[in-house]
Amino acid sequence: MTPLSGAARPEALEGAAKFTVRDLDFYYGDFHALTGMNIDVRENSVTAFIGPSGCGKSTFLRCLNRMNDLIPGTRIDGTITLDGEDIYGPGVDPVDLRRRVGMIFQQPNPFPMSIYDNVAFGPRLHGIKKKEELDQIVEQALMRANLWKEVKDIMERGGLTLSGGQQQRLCIARVLAVQPDVLLMDEPCSAIDPTSVQKVEDLMAELKSSVTIIIVTHNMQQAARVSDETAFFLQERQGEPAELIEFGRTAEIFTSPHDRRTEDYITGRFG
Amino acid sequence: MGKRWANRIALGVLWLCGITTVLVLGAVILYVFVRGIGQITPEFILTRPYGVNAEGGIGPTIVATIYVTGLAMLITTPIAVLAAVYLAEYAVQGRLVNAIRFAADTLASVPSIVMGLFGFAFFVEAMGLGFSVLSGALALSFLMLPIVMRATEEAIRAVPRFIRWGSYGLGASKWQTVSRIVLPSALPRILTGLILAMGRAVGETAVVIFTMGQAINMPFTPLDSGRSMTVHLYTLAMEGINMDAAYGTALLLMVMILFFNLSARWLTARNRKVKE
Ligand SMILES: Nc1ncnc2c1ncn2[C@@H]1O[C@H](COP(=O)(O)OP(=O)(O)OP(=O)(O)O)[C@@H](O)[C@H]1O
Ligand SMILES: [Mg+2]
């Protein structure tokens, strides 16, 4: 096995663990999707999840904000802690958790309402009603999402009238408006134009001083560019659960991976 | 050669079958239009019938029809929408849900004369509501309920999973997601279902004849009785009292129902445009 099969945490990196995952197994009904996952996600850094299609990256991501709870028949074993607190423990409300752990999806999914209302949706849910306060939150969120300049004069237009890349940044602004500690991004750039990809990568670099980011990507160059640490997932045989093969500093994973399978995957994808 | 001809013939037959639908609709509308248009005057629409031959207008029957349909809609909408929300979002999918769905589908296929009979026994007699707009509306709502419920359930299911997840991802509760995101997104399709159900109710005869009565009243309170346009049309034509007025009534009915169907189409089209 790899040196990382126990508690997977690269020694060289400093900083507190935001998420700590121990012995995680996950099931969709009878289908055992993930097994034996151990990982520490460091606070205020960018962690990339890579691996072939169907190896459970999205599934794992959805464990971290309990989005899988919404899929009937799913089951989880093991523990996940956020800031030391078990997120599957009794007394944890998944609704509160999801506010702290925001999520961005592959397909931009603005609500069928105005740009302003999209961003104000979260704050309003949590009881903010005053116009000035909302205005300020919306403006700040849009600025952090690198979208403010493009939309500041068209706030009342429908969110769905924006281009795909703008829609994705709108969704990022919408999540930032509820002040999450963590941002889960599931292939956020695979359905948008190159200029927007650039802007999303820029904003990730800006955000990471205040937000812990986990990004799933099929683009190795992107993983290498944006992330501090990288985790490689693999489902070795059809029907078997996926495993976490290797986890470490991005520079190391890409230049001198410990595991043969990691190397094969990365060189294959780069080639 | 042979292949090409077979292809052409098949295409021709398909085209003919398709066009038949349009022709049938056109023929019905044209016939009713030609026979009825001479009747349509402001007087016909506004005044009440008089004399043994039911001369004059059909005003009270129009009012009774709109009244009973509107009331039926008010009764149906909340029940049907909430039931659909329960089915689509909350109920654990299983036997009970299947039973509810089966019941709704069967309810939709109960012959309307049977529904009328039931409405008479239950609302008019047992509950003592008498022949009244209220009895009629309650009985009609049984007819509309499955249509609106099915349409709403499908509309809710058609809201993409990703949009819901966007809402849950912001820390919205289930009810917040359903009421602020899912229902507004589904609204155009729900309205389409409602409009189609109203068209159905406007054209219904058997149910209202048993529950609202046949007296030519201008109904005022929900407990007044009244005669719907369809019942009026039926009586005029079956007893050969006044065929011209019958065709005039038929034309007005067609116009109303066509209006409902066209609004439903318009809503669907507009909705599609917004999505794109
Ligand atoms: N809702 C679900 N119900 C049952 N099985 C599922 C469900 N979602 C995913 N799976 C299965 O779980 C496994 C992991 O899927 P997942 O979507 O997490 O992979 P992924 O790594 O994100 O793939 P991709 O790179 O294509 O997005 C797959 O075999 C998939 O078929
Ligand atoms: Mg995925």
Image (tube, coloured by chain):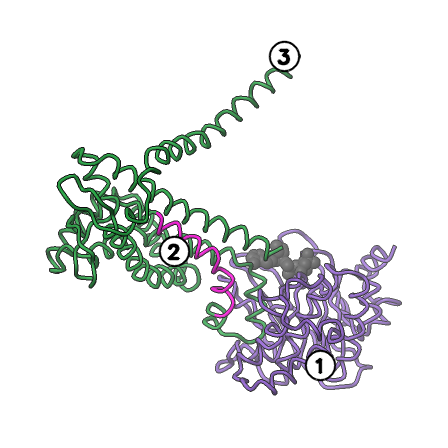
Tag 2 and tag 1, C-beta contact below 8 Å: no
**Quarter, ligand 1:** bottom right
Please name the residue that numbered disc 1 is placed on: A211
Q: Do discs 1 and 3 share a chain?
A: no
Tint applied to chain A in the drawing: purple
Bounds of the magenta span?
B180-199
Please name the residue that numbered disc 3 is placed on: B2
Please name the residue that numbered disc 2 is placed on: B94
Query: Is any atom of residue A55 visible in this view?
Result: no
Q: Is residue B115 magenta?
A: no
Q: Quadrant of the C terminus of chain B?
A: bottom right
Comparing B234 with A11, the one in front is: B234
What separation in Å lies between label 3 and label 2 (alpha carbons)?
A: 53 Å
- In this rendering, the answer to whether B52 lies above or below B15 is below
What separation in Å lies between label 1 and label 3 (alpha carbons)?
A: 70 Å
Tell me: is circle 1 under 8 Å from ligand 2.
Answer: no
Q: Which percent across, then down, holds residue A62?
A: 61, 68
